[in-house]
Image (cartoon, coloured by chain):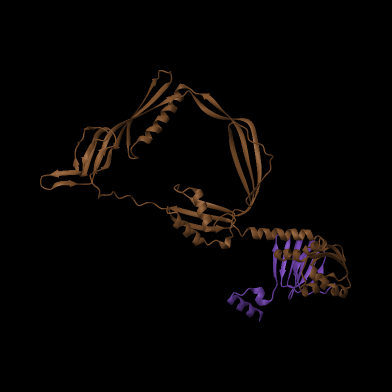
Amino acid sequence: MFAIRILNFLKGYVIVNVEGFFLERFLNIAAHRRIYLWNVRHLGSAKMRLSISAKGFTQIHDIVANTQSHLSIAAKRGLPFIVYKYRRRVGIAIGLFIFFVMIFVLSRFIWVIDIEYAGDKVPTDKIYGELAAAGLKTGSFISGVGKDDVARHLMTNISEFSWVGINIKGTRGIVQIKERMDPPQMPDESKPCHIVAARAGVIETINTRLGEQCVSRGDAVSDGQLLVSGIADSAQLGVRYTHATSEIIARTWLESSSTAEDFILVRNRNGAKKSKHIISIFSWNIPLFLNENVDFAEFDRETSTHNLRLGENFILPFAFKYDKFYSVDIDKQPISADEAIANAAAKARADLTQKLISGDSKILGEEVSTTTAPTGELIVTVSWECLENIGKQEEIL
Amino acid sequence: MKKLREKIADAFDVPKDVALGQSKIVIIGEQEVNIENYHGILEYDTSIVRIKTADKIIRIIGSKLEIDTITDEDIQIVGSIKAVEWGAFECLP
């Protein structure tokens, strides 16, 4: 019944007053003729008010005459009456029409491209470039984009991608990319080579699979020293060249120093700020500011973009952007001596981590010491004792 | 005869109001009475509404009674309802 009432609003209905002595008969005849009535209310002994559809209203005149009643219209409600009232206002109709057409047309293009890419081998600019070359860019017509073709184009042109999936949701294009995982490098066993030390140290363990071992456990070796030789010389077989293979773990010592600074640089916003607002339609940016140059020496910049959207996926090409510039003072904030030493030690450790041969190296122990330079500054030195695989292959030429 | 029809209706699980041509009356709280399959309105007043159904007259007594919806088969009455009664055919007043 409720749905029918909504329908009646759209078709238009009238609230009428019926007066007479045979009201029940009126109701019976109207109901029998399937004229839908509702909200029937008694207003006294011979009067009632009811709502009737506009179409029904045209059909009840003979019933009214038949039952010797009197009809009067109390109110007219519904869409047809509203339209009639505004029938002269063509502008509204035109505006409404243009609005719907624009929404319809604009939602047939792609306005945003999202790239779901978990790796970092390929810069995003390049990805956008390839997508544009394949036909998928902001402003391209949705029906003109062949999802499979674009995906294939991307996979062929960028070799680091093993799978590209393209989905278009609303006006948003979603590109999913999976990087190719390189197969593990099989060591090239064809070239003959020696194994030399990558760093000085004391040998802890040495397991030679192929080659002539020249050092043994407990030996101190220097940087570049020959550890396993690929040249085998024996009386029976003559000189043979092999690809020496060996795992050599040695104890090494690394050291790094850095100066302790008794202050740290802090960025403090000092209150002065400027903002620039831009309205962007399609790709035109209309600036809404007079041309002030940002003349702060140092500043923090915050950029926000608000896109006009109808729900999560229907993004329209109208956006409102603003940049806020906050002037920043860079102050030197003094810190305590302990903090200064800790900062310097952290810097030294970062440096040492870079110097380690590989991620498998184990750090056995650490020592931190401070010395005072002749200039009065404090120098912090971090020393590490590590177990590292110091074997390095060197080709025999 | 009526008993036989009733038994057949029960056996086939056909709803009784459809099989026997009876009216279905739904009373919701003290505010609403829906009568499906009625024949006509006999009297309508703010305190009494009399509805004719197949073989009985239903009298609804209350105050501020309004007819919410009326079609050719169903009628819905709202208001403060005090009593719903059945009576045999009465002479129209």
Visible in this render: residue B12?
yes
Residue B20 in the image: state x and y as whole percent. Answer: 67, 77
What is the number of callouts on the image? Answer: 0
Left or right, B91 with reference to A376: right
Residue A26 in the image: state x and y as whole percent. Answer: 83, 72
Residue A4 in the image: state x and y as whole percent. Answer: 72, 66
Camera-nearest residue between B42 and B84: B42
Which quadrant: the C terminus of chain A?
Answer: top left
Q: Residue at 64% x, 79% y: name it.
A: B5
Left or right, A238 with reference to B10: left
Camera-nearest residue between A231 and B18: A231
Instruction: Give the chain letter for purple.
Output: B
- In the rendered view, would you say A348 is above or below B64? above
The quarter of the displayed image where residue B93 is located = bottom right
Camera-nearest residue between A156 and A184: A156
Which quadrant: the N terminus of chain A?
Answer: bottom right
Instruction: Give the chain letter for brown.
Output: A
Camera-nearest residue between B7 and B38: B38
Q: Residue at 63% x, 47% y: name it.
A: A306
The quarter of the displayed image where residue A231 is located = top left
Visible in this render: residue A310?
no
Residue A112 in the image: state x and y as whole percent. Answer: 58, 53
Q: Residue at 69% x, 76% y: name it.
A: B21
Left or right, A242 with reference to A86: left
- In the rendered view, would you say A359 is above or below A36? above
- In the rendered view, would you say A317 is above or below B34? above
Q: Residue at 44% x, 23% y: name it.
A: A338
